[in-house]
Amino acid sequence: MMRGFLEFIMRGRKQAMLMAMLFVFVPFLGWVSSAIIALVTLRIGILQGLFILLWTTLPSIGLAWTGNSTSLYFNVLAGTGLTWILAVILRITVNWRLVLLAASAMGILAVGIAHWVIPDVQAWWMAKLQVAVSQASKAGVLDISVASSLTALKPITAFLTGTLVAFFLLMALFNVVIARWWQAMLYNPGGLKKELYQLRLDKISVVGLLTITALVFFNNPLAQDCLPVLILPLALIGLAVIHVLLANTRHNLLWLAGFYGLLILLLRPVAIILVMVAVLDSLIDIRKRLKGVE
């Protein structure tokens, strides 16, 4: 069924555009539209992918025309548009490492622009949180006072912009991975697995990311807000190493399911471990030391 769906998309631009436009309106499946655009970009061409992207943008432009520009900003610029850019980079470079580094650079730039446009980002987030908490309190959702809630939430405002940017980057990367998986399914079976198993950062890139991260300890507001963006590529590469480590074990799918469950339950400590694994891999290339892993 999946193969038939993908073969239909690849028959021509009209079919791809039809499917991409259709999934724009399907709740919780809008990401499929982005993945289709990425697939067309990767397989057929950059301009073909851009053409379909522009067509899928029309509903958001229509909403923006009526005064609701949220859809245009989030669904297009931070969603489909970002996915297309990352797909273009992957098509040109055929290098996931460069895709991750480019995503990190764009994320740092986005956070930097936010800090430039809004001089006191933390105060801006606190104002937004105050409105949200007050509404939740009036609706009877909160069991504690508004003041106590805001006091508890204040520390996270230093990272909220970066967290939001990192989330959009993660979703765009997910869409590109799905598109690459579809492409491999049709034209290069097993190709995506091989690419992701070989994914690692070089020493210079790791040192650069860690150097920027070190600024957090000097209470640099911009570096603090960039922390989620900086952690993202290292954590993803750590995941790639974990997949390789578990690939040749018995019941590997069960082990992977358990690991992802642990990641969900203990996100922060497990993410730190993934970062450490990625850094170690950049130094000694763990995968090359594993027998039987290609």
Image (tube, rainbow, N blue to C red):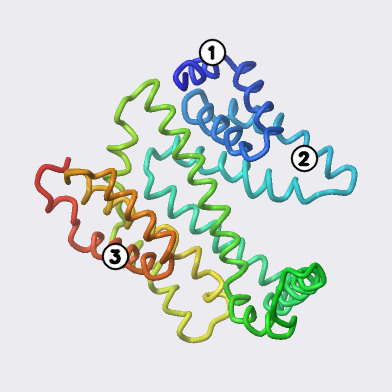
User: According to the image, label 2 marks what residue?
Assistant: 60
C-beta proximity under 8 Å, tags 3 and 2? no
Q: CA gap, disc 3 to disc 1? A: 43 Å
Q: Is residue 195 left or right of residue 231?
A: left
Label 1: few (<14), some or many (≥20) within 10 Å? Answer: few
Residue flagged by tag 3: what amino acid is it? Val
Residue 199 lies, with reference to residue 91, above or below; the image says below
User: Would you identify the image quadrant in which residue 14 lies?
Assistant: top right
User: According to the image, label 1 marks what residue?
Assistant: 11
Q: Secondary structure at mark 2?
A: helix
Upstream in the sequence, badge 3 or badge 1? 1
Q: CA gap, disc 3 to disc 2? A: 41 Å
Q: Quadrant of the C terminus?
A: top left
Q: CA gap, disc 2 to disc 1? A: 27 Å
Residue 58 place in picture, x, y as percent:
77, 33
Q: Residue 182 versus residue 95: which sits nearer the camera? A: 182
Q: Name the residue rendered at 66%, 72% in the picture.
A: 115
Residue 56 place in picture, x, y as percent:
70, 32
Q: Is residue 103 left or right of residue 77?
A: left
User: Would you identify the image quadrant in which residue 232 lies?
Assistant: bottom left
Q: Residue 19 versus residue 270: which sits nearer the camera? A: 270
Q: Is residue 256 left or right of residue 170?
A: left
User: According to the image, label 3 marks what residue?
Assistant: 279
Label 2: few (<14), some or many (≥20) within 10 Å? Answer: many
Upstream in the sequence, badge 3 or badge 2? 2
Residue flagged by tag 2: what amino acid is it? Ser
Q: Secondary structure at mark 3?
A: helix
